[in-house]
Amino acid sequence: MAEKRWIPETLFDDLGFRMTFEVERVLYEMQTEHQHLVLFEQRHFGKILMLDGATQVTTADEFIYHEMMTHVPILAHGKAEEVLIVGGGDCGIAEEVLKHKTVKRLTQVEIDASVVEFSKEHFPEFTGPVLKDKRFDLIIDDGIKYVKQTDRRFDVIIVDSTDPQGPGIVLFSPEFYTGCKRCMKKGGVMVTQNGVPFYQPEELTKSINKFRKLWNDGFCYVAAIPTYVGGHLAMGWATDNKKMRQTPVKTIAQRYAKAGKFKTKYWSPEVHAAAFALPRFIAEHVAMAKG
Ligand code: SAM
C-alpha cells in the first residue's frame, strides 16, 4: 500500500508550527503564474484548497467564513447595491453575496484565472449559481491596479485575499486601501481577511492603523473557523459610519427578513452583533492601532 501523502500548512513556519493534513487524493496541483495551488480530498474536511501552503477553503467549514465576510457588511450597510470582491477565486464569497436580491451588481477582481477555472470543476456548489447570475462581473486583474483606476463605485468592498505573501502582499498595503477608499461610495464599508490574532497580532494592529488613516472607523470582528487554525479569525472593518457596526440586532433581523431570510449555518442577527464584541486580548491589539 503506497505511503499516504501528508500536506502541511506552512503559513506559520516562522512560529515553528505546522498543521498537516493526511491526503486521500490530490485532485489538482500546479504552479500557476502567481502561486502554488493544490486541491485535495481529506477524509474529515472534504475538499481543501491550499495556495502557497496556506489553507484557503475547505468544504467542511467554508460556510463560516463565507457567511461572515458577506452578510455582516451587507446587512450592516442596509442598502448595498454595488459590491466589489477583491480575490475570492473559489467564488464562495460571491455565492453568498448574490443571495442578497438588493445587490444590483457584483464585481469580482481575481488575479489568477487558474483558481476560477478549476473552481468551476471542483467547487460547482459555488461557481454554478454565481457564473449564471447576470449580476456577476468577473475581472481577471491585480486588485491593487483595479481599485486605483476603476470608474465604478461600491457600497461594500470585500477583500477575500490570501495572506500577506506572494500576490496577496499588495492587498495589505496603504496604497491598496487608498484605492479602496477612492472607489467606495459615501457611507460604504470595507471588510478584509485579516488573519488569526493569536498568531498574527501585529498584522491586525498594522491593518487597523492603515484603516484609521483613511476612514473614521477602523475595527474588526471575529469568527472561529476550524481550518484557519488558532482560534478566532479577524475580519477587518473600515467605514466612515461609526454607528454601522452597532446596528441593533432588531434592525439586522428586519433587513435579513426583507432580504429573503435565506438559509445560513453560522451567521444569525445575534451572531452578527456578537462578532464585534472582541475578546480582551484582541481588543488590546485593536486599541494599539493609532491611525
Ligand atoms: N478564504 C481564503 C482565505 O481566507 O485565505 C481566501 C480565498 S481566495 C482563494 C483568495 C484569492 O485571492 C486567491 O484566489 C488569489 O488568487 C487571490 N489574490 C491574491 N492576490 C491577489 C491580488 N493582488 N489581486 C487579486 N486577487 C488576488
Image (cartoon, helix red, strand yellow):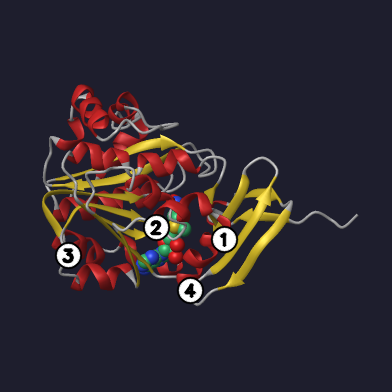
Q: Position of residue 143 (x, y in %)?
A: 31, 67
User: How many residues crowd mark 1 within 10 Å: few (<14), some (14–19), many (20+)?
Assistant: few
In the image shown, does 124 or 36 lie closer to the viewer?
A: 124
Q: Position of residue 140 (x, y in %)?
A: 37, 72
Q: Nearer the viewer, mark 3 or mark 4?
A: 3
Q: Secondary structure at mark 1?
A: helix
Q: Residue at x 23, y 24 (%)?
A: 249
Residue under pointer 4? 34
**Are the residues at dot 1 and dot 4 in contact (C-beta closer than 8 Å)?**
no
Q: Amino acid at mark 3?
A: Arg
* Lateral position of residue 239 relative to residue 113, left or right: left
**Are the residues at dot 1 and dot 3 in contact (C-beta closer than 8 Å)?**
no
Q: Position of residue 113 (x, y in %)?
A: 45, 71
* Lateral position of residue 291 relative to residue 257, left or right: left
Residue under pointer 2? 132
Residue under pointer 3? 152
In space, the residues marked 1 and 4 are separated at their CA atoms by: 20 Å
Q: Amino acid at mark 2?
A: Lys
Q: Amino acid at mark 1?
A: Glu
Q: Residue at x 63, y 67 (%)?
A: 29
Q: Amino acid at mark 4?
A: His
Q: Is mark 4 within 8 Å of ligand 1?
A: yes
Q: Is residue 122 above or below residue 269?
A: below
In the image shown, does 42 or 79 lie closer to the viewer?
A: 79
